[in-house]
Amino acid sequence: MERHQQILEQLKEEKHIKVATLCERLDVSAVTIRKDLKLLEDKGLLFRTHGGASLENPYMNERDVVEKATISATEKSLIAEAAADRVQENDSIIIASGTTVQQLGRAIKPKGKLNVITSSLLVAIELMKHKDIDIIQLGGNVRHRSGSVTGHYAEHILNHISSHQFFMGVDGIDLDFGCTTTNIEEAILNRKMMEAAQKTILLADSSKFGKRSLAKICELDEISEIITDKELSASDAERIREMGIKLTLV
């Protein structure tokens, strides 16, 4: 059917798409589109999501940090370099865990004194190369898959910290549901780090959009800025800007 082909072509371009968008573009009802998506999913051609469809499974399972580092490596490096430009002299920042923010640890070239609080052992190791960076490593339970710490001790330290910026990576971004990660304890700690900072900057390559993981961190409109790559779909970029979130494409 020609309409099915049009749906698949639009999905190929945008990676994920909403029912309402397809209704408008194809001039058919939501009931018709949902039936189309069900038929296409039954054929293994797409995955249905809440209110839309995706070419990839939108529900993310946890991957090892070494495996994740090989995915979208070029994009992550460019995102990290753009994020490093946000770090100011005598700044106080928090850096979460993840392969994109680990790249940020490599990209930071301090112009003066810098205070960094991090939950990531891998980020701390990168930052130790710079004598002008004072590092506070959060303590707690070490997660082997992510090279990070979680738990009560890390959360307790954050109750006594106030910082300028929080740089966060995620496993999934759904424009309606929000930012998610594969581990509940990671989500709780990310939330605490958000509360300890004046603003949150999200670092995520475009493959993270249209996906959800197990544990929700926050609503998308709680983010001050999103830095991602230029493969982000035009429709997602438009919606993000309409939400009042600064969007930087690299």
Image: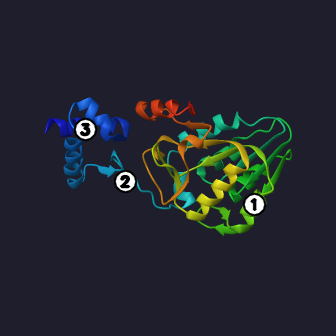
Residue to which mark 1 is pinned:
138
Q: Earlier in the sequence, mark 3 or mark 2?
A: 3
Left or right? Give the position of 69 relative to 9: right
Earlier in the chain: of badge 2 and badge 1, it is 2
Q: Residue at x 46, y 61 (%)?
A: 61
Residue beneath the point at 61% across and 67% down: 144
Question: The residue under label 2 is which amino acid type?
Answer: Asn
Q: Position of residue 139 (x, y in %)?
A: 75, 65
The alpha-carbon separation of the residues under discs 3 and 2 comes to 17 Å
Q: Which mark is residue 7?
A: 3
Query: Can I make out residue 140 in this image?
Result: no
Q: For mark 3, does the 10 Å Cα neighbourhood hold few (<14), some (14 to 19), or many (20 or more) residues?
A: many
**Mark 1 and mark 3 residues within 8 Å of each other at the beta carbon:** no
Residue at mark 2 = 57
Outermost residue on the bottom side: it is: 141
Q: Please tell me which residue lies in front, 106 or 175.
A: 175
